[in-house]
Amino acid sequence: MCASWSCWTLLLLGTGLSHALSGGMLYPRETPTRELKELSGIWSFRADRSAPRDDGFQQQWYKRPLRESGPVIDMPVPASYNDITQDIGLRDFIGWVWYEKEVWLPSRWLEDLATNRIVLRVGSAHYFSVVWVNGVQVTQHEGGHLPFEANISSVLKGSLGTPCRITIAVNNTLTLNTLPPGSIQFMNDPTRYPKGYFVQNIEFDFFNYAGIHRPVVLYTTPSVYIDDITIVTDISDNTGLVMYQVSVVGSEYYSVVVTLRCQDGKEVATALGAVGQLKVANANLWWPYLMNENPGYLYSFEVGIKADTDSGVREDVYTLPVGIRTVQVSGHQFLINGKPFYFHGVNKHEDYDIRGKGLDWSSIVKDLNLLKWLGANSFRTSHYPYAEEIMDLCDKYGIVVIDECPGVGIRQPESFGNKSLQHHLDVMEELVRRDKNRPSVVMWSVANEPASQLPPAGYYFKTVISHTKQLDSTRPVTYVSNANFDRDQGAPYVDVICVNSYFSWYHDPGHLEVIQLQLNNQFDSWYDKYQKPIIQSEYGADTIPGFHNDPPLMFTEEYQAIVLKHYHSVFDEKRKKCVIGELIWNFADFMTAQTVSRVVGNKKGIFTRQRQPKSSAFILRDRYWKLANNTGSSDSLWKDYATQDFYCSKRETTALYKPDTGNC
């Protein structure tokens, strides 16, 4: 084990870690052959406050119950640990923290370990994790925001009648080679700082929440099991095509049967074999929200296997939601199911009071309801992959997603080296493996606002984008740029140009009169050079709710409103030529590091952090519903239906909501 801060820093940099993914990462679901045990709740917790942050490894805290090696506190999982206590030292803590939970496993799980697997799965932990079960290390994982798991069956042999002790050490340290990158800076001036004082430097504008952010679960599978499923869909006239590949582990002698069922449970197609194609006559396509009267239509793809083993026949069953749809970039258009799609949506953060980035069902459902109220059809997972539970609801509701990896803040030349590149490729593999079957995911984003003007950025992003396309050739790939159009080294390799700009805010602050000129020039410059469709991936202004001034001044609600209107005027003109989307920054206010430019976080949200609307939310709502009525489906019935469903449900079925009047 590592015995020093420098040793663990090398481990965090990726030294000695395998770069090849093995196996699938299917979401844990209960089926006739699989059981699930949730471990959410209260865990024992301790931060390692020793100067080198290595007492836990030196003293082997994982070898015995955590309470026996020192004081512990209660910590909820999932949740960020930062805002749970009144301890300001814990809020900004950098280094190793330790979680532990003792659980009883059903005796039936432990009585037949020869024919069943017990798997421990962590939805995400920030950013480097080491996991032990009953004092035995079972896995380690580099990076946050994505799941990892381990088969712990062998560790549990002989443990019938005793609890299972799970220990997870998590380190939130960021280096120049992590995603996102960061650096540790030691402050060596003894007249200003105590001995050993250091800070974590970051190059991104959101709080570096840490801890176990998503559910920890135990689940079982048979010893011969369905390890992975890959789905690709297509459309031929009115027929939906579902190409599939099933990976089975544990035996070479098995049979596979797949069945596709519609939402009422009726079988619509079936086939034999691990690789094949299903044809669905008169298929219900997966459509985005507001583009069809029945958005987000999902079929159930059921996989059943039987395998001959020395101990008899083994069976496994897994069911995967599947949406039939196509995605294509054609000229200056983005097509879903062959029809032009215009992104009118938001950027978000997994960020909430108290729980930080911890998964919370109430907040998730509230946010999705607000998106539908707003008339938003899309969002970008700025600036990291969101929880699988959020993505499930996007599939269900028809919310289109630009799925972004944690490549935010890649600003230093050292972060474009081979070590960083290899880790970036690994992260894209993990992300594509997790979300490849989701109909809501229409494009991959490999970074946000990197220093793409630097010479190494060309090779770096050419490699990452090419690798991503090799992993998944069915979706476009982009990254989000704020570089000068003429110096962006990676732009030639993306399928869609995504541009962030804050005219009259970070540039020419307070000068509203320059917005339209500068924004028009921005679009013309990017399109003339690259001839690719463009999404305005960020724009906005900080607004403190309740601040008012006329004429508008920065930070007032009036200023945010007029910024939006200037941008919207240009969007409407450029949609005729090259603009295929607009994503406001941000959906809601969110927490950041403490700086003199941030007053308890970033205030660019159209909703407060508590999800209450600012004036700009109503402006955007009116705009998005008008866009939904003027774009999307060519059949106005669908637009009227989608609109009346939320606003005019008590009126005649032909009633149409008029955003400008608020009437039906």
Image (tube, grey):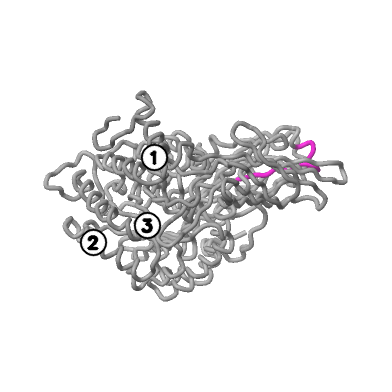
Query: Can you say whether 200 is above or below 531 in the image?
Result: above
Which residue is painted at 47% across and 63% down in the image?
175
Contact check, label 1 and label 3, Cβ < 8 Å: no
Mark 2 and mark 1 lie on one chain; the one further toward the N terminus is 2
Which class describes the residues within 10 Å of circle 1: few (<14), some (14-19), or many (20+)?
some
Residue 71 visible in the shown view: no
Under mark 3, the amino acid is Ile
Report the disc number at residue 636. 1
User: Of residues 658 and 585, which is closer to you in this image?
Assistant: 658
Check the picture and name the quadrant holding the C terminus.
Answer: top left
Category of crowding for the residue at label 3, using alpha-carbon neighbours closer than 10 angstroms: few (below 14), some (14–19), many (at least 20): many
Dot label at residue 662: none
**Percent position of residue 51, x then y:** 47, 56
Q: Amino acid at mark 1?
A: Ser
Q: Indicate whether residue 379 is drawn in magenta.
A: no
State left or right for residue 597 relative to residue 64: left
Instruction: Give the label, 2 or 1, closer to the camera.
Output: 1
Between 545 and 86, the residue placed more toward the observer is: 545
Numbered mark located on residue 535 in the image? 3
Residue 619 vs 18, above or below: the answer is: above
Tell me which amino acid carries mark 2. Answer: His
Extreme residue toward the bottom, this view:
455
